[in-house]
Image (cartoon, rainbow, N blue to C red):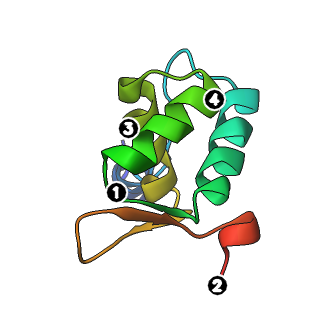
Amino acid sequence: MTRPTILLTIAAFGLTGCLALPPDGVSAEQIAAYDAAVTSIGCDMVAESDYLPVELQTGLTREQVIQVTEYKLAREEAVKLSDGGVRLTTGACAA
């Protein structure tokens, strides 16, 4: 490999870590339902009382809700809050 090719390959590997993929077994429709559910509780997920309605409204398990939340954070569609929670920052929750 030539030096430019090696540098491009390294850069490509570095970028692949930045690309967030949806959690396995979670459809685009379920992610949209997650967005609607989080919006319905005021855009912040901090405590058990926030996670339960999202689970009930979406049909997702707790683990799946956590995975979608991590996916949203990775895509910069959510931010971590100082109290340990997460705020959705897209759609109706956009500032």
The mark closer to the camera, 1 or 4, is 4
Is 95 located above or below residue 26 in the figure? below
Tag 1–tag 2 contact (CB < 8 Å): no
Which amino acid, by three-letter code, is at mark 2?
Ala
Task: Write down the residue under mark 3.
Answer: 66
In three-dimensional space, the C-alpha distance between marks 1 and 4, rounded to whole angstroms, equals 49 Å
In three-dimensional space, the C-alpha distance between marks 2 and 3, rounded to whole angstroms, equals 22 Å
Residue 38 rendering spot, x and y as whole percentages: 59, 52
Disc 4 on helix, strand or loop? Answer: helix
Q: Is residue 17 visible?
A: no
Task: Write down the residue under mark 2.
Answer: 95
In three-dimensional space, the C-alpha distance between marks 4 and 2, rounded to whole angstroms, equals 24 Å
Disc 2 on helix, strand or loop? Answer: loop
The mark closer to the camera, 4 or 3, is 4
Which amino acid, by three-letter code, is at mark 4?
Thr
Residue at figure coordinates x 54%, y 39% from the top left: 54
Residue 79 rendering spot, x and y as whole percentages: 42, 69
Q: Tag 2: Cα neighbours inside 10 Å, few (<14), some, or many (≥20)?
A: few
Residue 82 rendering spot, x and y as whole percentages: 25, 78
Residue at figure coordinates x 43%, y 49% from the top left: 50
Which amino acid, by three-letter code, is at mark 3?
Ile
Instruction: Say which quarter of the image contains residue 86.
Output: bottom left
Q: Tag 3: Cα neighbours inside 10 Å, few (<14), some, or many (≥20)?
A: some
Task: Write down the residue under mark 1.
Answer: 3
Tag 2–tag 3 contact (CB < 8 Å): no
Looking at the image, tell me whether mark 4 or mark 2 is earlier in sequence order: 4
The mark closer to the camera, 3 or 1, is 3
Residue at figure coordinates x 62%, y 41% from the top left: 34
Looking at the image, tell me whether mark 1 or mark 2 is earlier in sequence order: 1
Residue 58: give its label. 4
